Structures are given as C-alpha cells and as structure tokens.
Amino acid sequence: MRYHQAVHDVPLLMEGCDSVEQGDDLNVRDLLPDELVRSSLKLPDLPEREVVKHFVNLSQMNFGVDNGLYPLGSCTMKYNPKVCDEIVWWETVAGLHPLQDTGTTQGALALMHGLEQMLCEIGGVDAVTLQPAAGAHGEYTGMHIVRAHHESTGEDRNEVILPDTAHGTNPASAAMVGYDVLDLPSKDGCVDVEALKATISDDTAAFMLTNPNTLGLFEKDVTEIARIVHESGALLYYDGANLNAIMGKTSPGAMDFDIVHFNPHKTFATPHGGGGPGAGPVGVKAFLEEYLPVPRIVKKDGVYRLDHDRPKSIGKVRAFYGNFGVLVRAYAYILMLGGDGLERASEGAVLNSNYLKEKLKGIFDMPYGDLRKHEFVLSGKPLRQKGLRTTDFAKRLLDYGFHAPTIYFPLIVDEALMIEPTETETKDTLDAFVEACRMIMAEDPEILKGAPYNTARRRIDEAKAARDMILSWNAYEKKMADGAGSR
Ligand SMILES: *Cc1c(COP(=O)(O)O)cnc(C)c1O
C-alpha cells in the first residue's frame, strides 16, 4: 500500500510546556477594569518553534483537501486557491475593526457591497445579506424572512414542507423558527408533484428544495413545483449550499425561487470542516428585501454607509457584518474566475462526477436514474453479501490515501455512498480512486472489518467523538477532575 499517515506523539500544548503563564505580565492588564481581569489566564508559555512543531505534527496526522481527493458528497471539498487565503492576511483586511467609523472602512464596505451584487447575479436574486455565519444559519435567517412576510400579509401559516432527500439542517432550521415540518416522500429520487399537491395547503409557509437535489439529480419539474407553491401562497426556498453544478447555467432566481442561501465555504474558496468559520449569505427577490437583517450596506453619492433604519427588518442575526474573512475569499475567488470561469468550474464538476459515476456503477448499485450533476449516490448493498457495511469500505479507502465519501446520506438510499469529486481533481486522480475501489472490493472481507490500518488513529468510536467533545483545556481539566475522561 502506498499511503501511510505520519504518527507523532503530540502532547497537548499545556502538557508540553514547563510553566503556565498567569497573565500577570501581559501589558494589557493595566488598561482593563479590575472586574474584567481574570486571575488566571492559564496560557502555555512556549517558544514559537514548539508551537509550530505542535501544529505541523498534528496536521500530518490528519487528512485534508490539500493532501488528496476528499470526495465528501454535499460538502464540496474542492481545492481552494491559496491566493484567497493570502489576501485575508493583508493588513488592510486583517487589521480592520468592526467598530471603526465607516469613513475609514469604505474599501471593506465596497467589497461587501460588490460581493452582494455578484451573488445577486449568480443567484438570480435582487438583494443579498452577508450576515449569516453558515449555511444552516442562512436557512434560519431565510425562515425568519418567510415568517415576517406572512405576518405582514396577515396570514397564519405554520407548516414547512421539504422532500425526504433534504439536508438535515433544513428541517432543523424550520423547526427552530417554530414551524411544523412535513416530510414529502420522493418518487424516483425527485419531488413527487402529485404528493406535493396533496400536501400543500393554506397552512404551508414554505417549501424548501435543493436543486440539483442531494442525489445529484436535477428536479425536472421545478417550474411546475414553483407554480404549485406560489399558487398556494407559500414561498419557495432554495438550499444553495452547493452551487457547484449550476453556476452560469441557471440560477435559483431563474427557477422562480424566492429565497436562497449560499455557502461560500463550499462553492467559493474558503477551506472548511471542523466547524468553521463559514458564511451563509441569503438572497431574496425584491418583494422580500425589506425583511433582510440590519444593517444594510447602501451607496449614496459615491459613499457607502450602514443603514439601520429598516422598520420591517427581522433584525440582526449575527454580531457586526458577518464573517468578513470568508467574504473576502469569496470576492477574490469570484473576481479571479469571472463569469466564464465559474461556468467552467460547474462544467468540470458535472463532468468529473459523471465520469466517476460511469466507472463505479458496475462496482456498486446505483439507484434512481442515470445522468447526475455535481455528485452522485451509490448503494453499498453488494457489501452486505460479504457481511460488510458501507462504513467498512469507507474506512478502508483511507488506507489507500483517499478520504471517504459521505456515507448513509441521503437517507432514502440503502447503505448510501455519496460522492462529489469536484472540478479540481485530475483524471489521473479519479482513475486512481476507481482502481482503489476495485481493489478494496476484491479484498478479504476480514481486512475491511479492521480498517483503517495506515492512519494515525485506527477505527474510532464516532458516536463518542461527536457526543463527548472536549475542545478546550478547561473542559479537559474538568473532565479529568470528574474522573471520567481519557485522551
Ligand atoms: C452543507 C450543507 C448545508 C449546511 O451548511 P453549513 O454551512 O454546514 O451549516 C445545508 N444544505 C446542504 C445541501 C449542504 O450540503
């Protein structure tokens, strides 16, 4: 096997240092009121060299988009050009403070205003807010806009409908805004138009849809769906977390959606994973603009200012103006590619996806139709005959130097394997992935059951890792004091 992950013994920074700084000699102390000063800051006292070694060693025990194919469906783990990261460290970007007077931040406001306009064009919408901090947060903001709209027209609508292929954040966001969520069963992997007609009513506030949906299928009846939703007085919400399939080809606005959120950290060059930071700009058609969060960036007589005077606004959804660093990356990426470049990116994503699908569909089952957009979903059902599950196959891929695809989602596919190669991978890489899949399927099932072998950590308890997170030194100390934890 060609791939071996590095294994380093990396103590926690607090364990690796000789002394812990109490913060006494930090020169900011004199500037702060006594009640805001903590007696123990507990900062590890280490030379820069030790800190760099710590983080570089940790990074070598991990797998990321920069080491190889990361075909995590729905997540668009594509390569992010490094120039977009570099710009964010410029003093004129990183050195800004959100409380600066707008007279000193015209450049930043021009950038955000420009990005709003670019997203309007890409999304086919009339106005965009950059404030939400992630895709799910954009959905949440969008659902508040739905609520504000129906309140202003005096309608009492308390249901949100979504198809059973929806991303898990969709029902969660609708429920958090107080809506009852109705799950619509799909037909042949797409929205069942007759079922939608039967479900929609005067109680429906919105229908949330991802198109292409999470199976990678384009919802062919989208025009009919939009008509049905609007005739019933409901709004149509587009989950635009992954725009990678459609940029420059069509847009949510052209498909008659009223509200859309974007994920710059998937489509527009911000590295992601591990919880952020991301962003979740929300775009709307003109009739919903008055509900967008405050402040709005407005330009008058060549000067940008922040307008808080929006009586119908849903208010603020986040401190200040959003995750600025993510917005700067998106702006740089979109300018760099231009309209033609974005269109080519989408063409490449769809081509790579269909190429890989053709090569893999003989190895696995492939339910629901054929032509896919930027991603496709296979079924690992053939593994069952060998006493294996999709997760065993996914773990074994790591031993071949490939990150695993998304597994067990969408829920309507048995033993699902959701693969999104993205446009940034070469044909050689895709061919090597196919070869690895073929070799793994020919291996002794017992080998797969024990995988992975060549990674820094072997098979981990995923439920524990997700439920029992210890993310700070304080939390770790508390856990040890409670006697329950172990590293
Ligand atoms: C990633 C994703 C989301 C949620 O975005 P976050 O930024 O992770 O909150 C929503 N819908 C779809 C289809 C996604 O892929």
Image (cartoon, grey):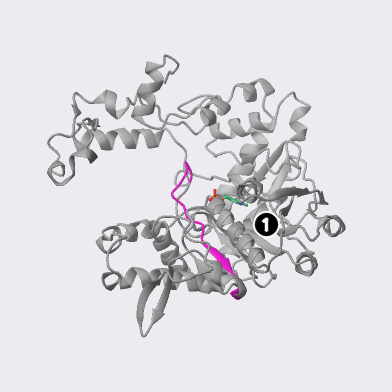
Q: Is mark 1 within 8 Å of ligand 1?
A: yes
The x and y percentages for residue 335 are 44, 70
Residue at 46% over, 52% down: 278
Please tell me whether mark 1 sits on a helix, a strand or a loop: loop
Residue at 24% over, 30% down: 42
**Magenta stretch holds residue 275:** yes
Residue 425 visible in the current orientation: no
The x and y percentages for residue 463 are 58, 27
The x and y percentages for residue 457 are 48, 26
> Which residue is label 1 attached to?
210
Residue 300 visible in the current orientation: yes
Q: Which quadrant, please, contains the C terminus?
A: top left
Q: Residue furthest front?
A: 154
User: How dense is the environment of label 1, judged by Cα within 10 Å: few (below 14), some, or many (20 and up)?
Assistant: many
Question: Who is closer to the viewer here, 377 or 358?
Answer: 377
Horizontal relation, residue 408 to residue 17: left or right: right
Question: Who is closer to the viewer here, 288 or 356?
Answer: 288
Per the rendered image, the range of residues in magenta is: 273-286
Q: Residue furthest bottom?
A: 301
Horizontal relation, residue 411 to residue 303: left or right: right
Residue at 53% over, 49% down: 77
